[in-house]
Image (tube, rainbow, N blue to C red):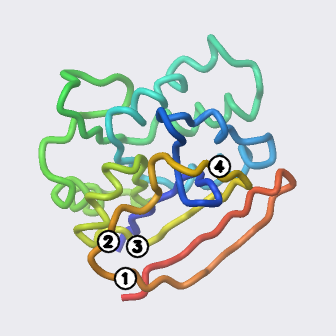
Amino acid sequence: MVPVVYSMTVSLDGFIAGPGDDIGWTAPDPELMRFHNEQTRDLGAHVCGRRLYQTMLVWETAEQTMSDETDLEFARIWRPIPKVVFSRTLNSVEGNASLATGDIATEIGRLRDRPGGGAVAIGGAGIAAAAIAEDLVDEYRQFVRPIVLGDGTPYFPRLDRALDLRLVESRIFGSQVVYLRYQRVR
């Protein structure tokens, strides 16, 4: 079955955004960006909420606003990936995106059943929390940045049960970001 992957940069104390939704501390260095490019090549679809969708719109016009070749490569990889956006306020979306018409389990089921394969990625804490509650996430990927924020948006929601995970990969980047990849033990 096509895996569902939740991948985000996270502070040492477990937040994906600081107070006031600050994500300025999450920008990847060139080495990490190349790693993100390789991981993104393996995606067959991406599910996100409105805020992350709007943050990622910059990649739709990257050639007009960016000059770094690694960034432009990410844009070329990212744009064709089908995206499903969960939003209560958006009436339309751009690029290769569509608005969700079902609940999280229905939308992920559709993406898992589509031809072509490739992992289904989930981005954003809110939509990930809904997928975790439905036990839909197969793999957790954290890019742990050596910063303590003290407060913000947590990577994991409050859980009513423990998640048994198995570490399958780790890596330390020159920027001291630690990549941890866990698979769900079922």
**How far apart in space, not on screen, are marks 3 and 1 (Cα)?**
14 Å
Q: Quadrant of residue 113?
A: bottom left
Label whose residue precedes the other's in the sequence (2 or 4): 4
**How far apart in space, not on screen, are marks 3 and 2 (Cα)?**
16 Å
**How far apart in space, not on screen, are marks 1 and 4 (Cα)?**
28 Å
Which amino acid type is shown beneath numbered disc 3?
Asp
Asked if labels 2 and 1 touch by Cβ distance under 8 angstroms, the answer is: yes
Dot 4 lies on which element?
A: helix
Residues packed near mark 3 inside 10 Å, few (<14), some (14 to 19) or many (20 plus): some
Frontmost residue, 85 versus 116: 85
Which amino acid type is shown beneath numbered disc 2?
Leu
Residue at (25, 40) in percent of width and height: 86
Residue at (42, 87) in percent of width and height: 185
Frontmost residue, 174 versus 18: 18
Q: Which residue is mark 3?
A: 138
Badge nearest the viewer, 3 or 1: 1
Which amino acid type is shown beneath numbered disc 1?
Ala
Q: Which residue is mark 1?
A: 162
Where is residue 8? Give x, y as percent.
54, 53
Label whose residue precedes the other's in the sequence (1 or 4): 4
Which residue appears farthest toward the right when viewing the image? 174
Residue at (41, 27) in percent of width and height: 54
